[in-house]
Amino acid sequence: MKHLPKLAATAALAAAMLASPAFAALKTGSHAPDFSAPAYLAGQPFTFRLADALKKGPVVVYFFPAAHTSGCNLEAHLFSEAIDKFKAEHATVIGVTAGNVDQLADFSKETEHCGGKFPVAADPGAKIARQYDSVLEQKPEWSDRTSYVISPTGSIVHVYSNLDPKKHVEETLSAVRALGK
C-alpha cells in the first residue's frame, strides 16, 4: 500500500510526458557537442568518449528520461533487439540519461532492457542533455527522449524527438543506413 503514491506519481508523470510533444533544438548539420561520460556495458563501468566512438563510424546518441521507467525500458529493449543491424553499418549506439543514474549498471545488463548489447551513460544534472537541447520540459533534471545520428565527421545528420519510444530505432537505423549509401 505504501507504494501506491509513488506508483500514482510515476503514472501521472508518464502520462504527462506522452501527452506533450518533444522538441530538439540542435538541427541537422549542426556540429555535435563532444562529451565524455561515465557509462556501463553489461554492468561494467567505463568512460564513454564520443570522439573515440566517432573514429569507428557513425554514432547514435539517444537520450532517454530515466532507467527503469516503462518507455525507457521499451526503448532500450528495441535498441537491444536491433543492435546487430547498427553494428552491420559500423555504428555505435549509446543511451544517455540524467534520470536514475544510480541504476544504470543493472539497467545495462538486464536482458529486458539493454541486455549487455550496448552501453548507457550517466548524465547527472543533465549537463550533456543541455548541450544537446534535450532536457525534459516537465522535469528539467531529466533528459528528453531525443535521438541523434552523428556522422564520423561530428556533424548531426538526423534528429528525432518524440516521447513515444517506438520509432527511435527505425528513425536512427534508416539515417545510419543512408550515411552508408
Image (cartoon, rainbow, N blue to C red):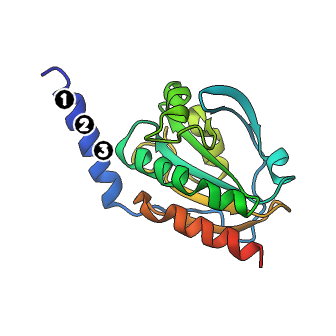
Q: Earlier in the sequence, mark 1 or mark 3?
A: 1
- Residue 30 shows in the view: yes
Neighbourhood count class around disc 1 (C-alpha, 10 Å): few under 14, some 14–19, many 20 upward: few
Q: Residue 166, image x and y in percent?
A: 42, 61
The type of residue carrying mark 2 is Ala
Q: Which residue in the structure is indicated by mark 2?
A: 9
Above or below for 150 versus 100: below
The reply to whether dot 1 and dot 3 touch (C-beta < 8 Å) is: no
SS assignment at label 2: helix
Q: Residue 86, image x and y in percent?
A: 66, 59
Neighbourhood count class around disc 2 (C-alpha, 10 Å): few under 14, some 14–19, many 20 upward: few
The type of residue carrying mark 1 is Pro
The type of residue carrying mark 3 is Leu
Measured Cα–Cα span from mark 2 to mark 3: 6 Å
Residue 5's disc number: 1
The reply to whether dot 2 and dot 1 touch (C-beta < 8 Å) is: yes
